[in-house]
Structures are given as structure tokens and as C-alpha cells.
Amino acid sequence: MTAPLDLSPAPGAVPLPRMIMSQAGYEFRTVLRNGEQLLLTLIIPVVLLVLFSATSLLDLGSGRRVDFLAPGILALAVMSTAFTGQAIGTGFERRYGVLKRLGATPLPRAGLIGAKTASVLAVEAVQAAVICAVALGLGWEPHGDPASVLVLLLLGTAAFSGFGLLMAGTMRAEAALAAANLVYILLLAVGGVVFPLEKFPGPVRDALELLPISALAGGLRDVLQDGAAFPAQPLLVLAVWAVAGLALAARFFRWE
Amino acid sequence: MTPPGGGGRDSAVELHSLVKRYGAATAVDGLSLSAARGAVTALLGPNGAGKTTTIEICEGFRRADSGTVRVLGLDPVAGGRALKPRVGVMPQSGGVPGTARAGEFLRLVASFHATPLDPDALLARLGLTEHARTPFRRMSGGQQQRLSLAVAIVGRPELVFLDEPTTGLDPQARHATWELIEELRAAGVSVVLTTHNMEEAERLCDRVVIVDHGQVVAEGAPEELTGAERQLRFRARPGLGLDELLAALPAGSAAKESPAGHYLIEADVRPELLATVTAWCASHGVLTEDLRIERRTLEDVFLELTGRELRS
């Protein structure tokens, strides 16, 4: 048969950072293996980027098409991972008792959230690398200050994570799945991702600019297309969404 | 602080006057029990008796409305951080992501622990080696149960809570699980489990706590619960004169025929009683078949205490 196991008690946890690294690595591999999630996080953004850069199906204004599209597609990538992916993934983990079960292990809840955040950032890095490579191949000429880009991406991630986790922790998993996909499509349509907000009438446009996706897409465009540094309004809008989303998630998230 | 009811340091789990309500329903109603260290303790009870709620309070997943809970001497909520590495938990079902591969998830949980069991050896032990790369949702119910048990013990805990560890297992898997639980006890691990399976409670457990309507209705070692009472059964032709037989037996004995031709004598079963019964049969020209002396089973005790009506 098999060698005897030494079952005698020898309890003990590894240091928290090691637990977080293990969990983050596990979550990262899970996302990259999940076909539906890859469709949302990589395939759709890349297809939109290539399709609308290479054709004149959309009127994107006066500038070069890829210079307008690439920042919007980067914003879409952040939303797909931090918001849609987490709302669905974590929602089903809650539904299937995975969060509860992990709660019985030495990994604390804060460590689990830390691991999810690390995994989201790692997936976003892969997305950004692929999208930038494709955009550069299409002749993209980014300008501006990398630090501003990084801050915009991090604030956007915080804002979308807050609302993604809020949905995952309060709604039925099936409802979160439907709602998260619906929000993704709606914000893709009206958030200045590929359709310029200039096409909307003034008051509507002002309202749409307050959406987190418009602030992220617009802010990235301000920097990467126009060379601005730390664009104030988009950063402020994203900060407000981030604080609101994370506070609501912390208050209302239910682990089972 | 020593919890009321004694026990203290020798107890893996000590519950005193535990109450838990869900709205108008009282799931746990003043339950007290003590599970010794290094022993296997079973919570036995019908569906809805409050077993799982009790276990989940011990695991720190729920808070009791009142009463005291000590797990390895600590409060499971306040002492949660200290307890997590020391306590293994096997929930009744699920708890593993559907897309996770068996080996991957077991290695993940093992990686949280300082000196875990070798995940591959544990998978081999539970007959799951060929399913190490199978996603959880594509494993059979029995395979999922075994993986869940593996996850509970991979960190080499001092105490494990197993909520219905063998429900839905085939006989081979059930015996493999029993052997593993016996090895855990031999290694000094305290085990608290819930079960519906009387055979499991009877052969595996040092102590059985029968719970119904959120209260303990009986507890003790299985042989204490079943008691020394014995009974005599035999088959013979139908319609024997039981009144006449009873007259030959000591006072307080009872005899019945049910179904026809199946006889049960409840009495203080001693060698003389057996001789009396067989002599009476001989004198009436009755040949007995399948004559046997039995103990009451745990199932008899259980049904006596919790009744025969169906539970939801």
C-alpha cells in the first residue's frame, strides 16, 4: 500500500506574506485557466482595439485612431478584471462555501483580500503588456508620464474592486454574474471606452464623465494621448468611487 | 479562566448551556457537552437536531446567543487566529472551488501550514492520486468528501471537526475513512464528528452524544448507552402459547411474537433463562431456529430517545 502518514499534531502557520503569496498565485493561475474570464479580460479588449483601429467603423474624432483607443482599452481591461472578474469569481466562491472554508484555514480574511488584490494586479499587468504590444504594433505613440498612468490604474483598480466585491458579497452568485456582465456592457458603451463622449449631448456627457470608467479612460487619454500629468478631475472622480466602493464593501460584504 | 462544568484542560471542546436561535426557531437550546482530548466524540442526532449549528459555533463560524464555548481552552471567535492552525475543519459539503484541481487545492491549504503532511502522500492514502488533476466539480461525491477530509487534516491539527465525514461514501471509502480516523486518534488527535451512521458511532467513537431539538438527550460510551440489557430471539412455528412460556420465566420478563413465527423475549438473559426457554420448547415439541442472544444496538437506543417520526 502506501507509506504511513505521521498524523501526530504539529500545528503552525507560515508567516502571513507567504500565505498571501500562495493564495495570490493560486488565484492568478485560476483566472488564466478560466476560458470565460479570458474572453472578458483579454480577447474582447484586443478584438475591439484591433477592429476599431484598423477600420473606420467608428468616428473617433480627429486624432490617430489607435492613440484614442489604446487608453480606453486599458481602462476596459482594468474594469474587466477588478470589477467583472471579481464580482463573478468571488460571488461563486461565496456561494460554494469556499470563502467560509478558507476562513477555517490560517489565512486571515484581510490576507485573502490582499491575495485577491495582488492577483488582480498581476492579471492587469499581463493584460497591459498584451494590449500595449498590440497597440504599438498598430502604430500607437504613447506620451506622458508613467507615474500618472500608474496612479490612474491603481485608483481605477481600487474603485472597481470595491464595487466588484460589494456585488460578490451581497448578491446571489447568479444575479451577480448577470449584473456584472450587464454593467460591463453598459459602461463599455457609454463610458468613453471606444465611443467618444463628445458624441453625447452636453448635460449627458457631463454626467457620464462622472462614471469611474469614463474617468479612467479619460484620465489615461489625458496623459497618454495629450501628455498631461496627474489630470485632476479624473483622479478626483476615481478617488471618490474608490473610497465609496471599498467602504460599502467593507460594510456590507457577507462571507456566507 | 476555567469554563463552568469542569473539564478544562483535558477537554478539546467544552460547551456549556449553549443557545442559538435563528429568528423564531431555536436550533441549539441549552446544550452542554465535553469532548475529551485525544478521543473520538460523535454528535448523533436526527436531521435538524442542531448538530451542524453546534459544530459551526465551535469552528467560530457562528456566535452563540448565550452560553460558553471553549475549544482547546480558547473562545473560537476571540481566539480564532490562534486556533486556526490547530483546528482542522471538514464542512458537510463543498468549500472547494469547482474549477480547482484536487491536488492544487490541497497543496494550497498545505502551504499555509508550517509542517504539513505531504499532499501527494495524503492523496495516495485516500485513493485520490489519479484524480489529483481533476477539477473538484468533476469528482464524484465520494471523491469530493475524501478530498475535503484531506484538506481538514493536511495541516496536522490537534483537533478536527468532521461534519458527516462518511455520508454518501461507498463501503470501501467509508472503511478507509474510518481507518484514517482511528489513526488520527492513535496519533493523539482529538476528533469531533457528526453522523447518522450508528455503526460508525458504535465502532469508531469513544463517546457518543445524542442530540435532539438542540439538547443533549443522552451521552456516554457506546456500550454505556446500549447498556448491559440483552434480549433473546428465535424463530419457531407460529402461535406458541406465550402466556404459558412467560409463566415459566422470571417476573418482569416480556415476550412477543412479531411477525408471525418470530419471537422476542426481553428479560434478564442468563444461562438459566436460556435453559428454561429451550426446555419449554422441547416439552412442547417445538424446534427453535436462529436462536440468538443480542445486545440492544445504538440504533435501538437512538430510536427510543428520539422517536420514530420522520424529520424534515
Image (spheres, grey):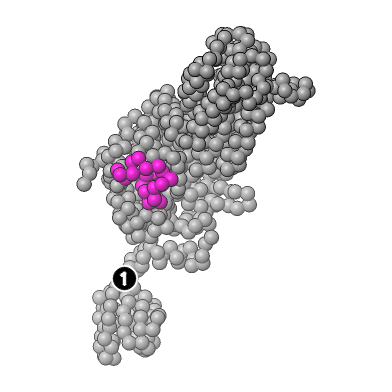
Q: Which residue is located at x 30 percent, y 51 percent?
A: B176
Judging by the rendered image, the residue that carries numbered circle 1 is B294
Can the viewer see residue A242 in this picture?
no
Q: Which residue is located at x 33 percent, y 44 percent?
A: B131
Can you tell which quarter of the image residue A84 is in?
Answer: top right
Please state if B45 lies on the left or on the right of A4 as rendered. right
Can you tell which quarter of the image residue A174 is in?
Answer: top right
SS at badge 1: strand
Region in magenta? B128-149
Please state if B270 lies on the left or on the right of B78 as rendered. left
Q: Nearer the viewer, residue A214 or B73?
A: A214
Query: Can you give x and y, in whole percent of width and height, for residue B231 in the image?
Result: 34, 73
Query: Can you give x and y, in whole percent of width and height, for residue A255 in the image?
Result: 54, 37
Query: Can you give x and y, in whole percent of width and height, for residue B112 in the image?
Result: 38, 31
Q: Which residue is located at x 54 percent, y 30 percent?
A: A44
> Up-down: is A71 above or below A175?
above
Residue A165 is inside the magenta segment: no
Q: Nearer the viewer, residue B61 or B205?
A: B61
Q: Which residue is located at x 49 percent, y 42 percent?
A: A97
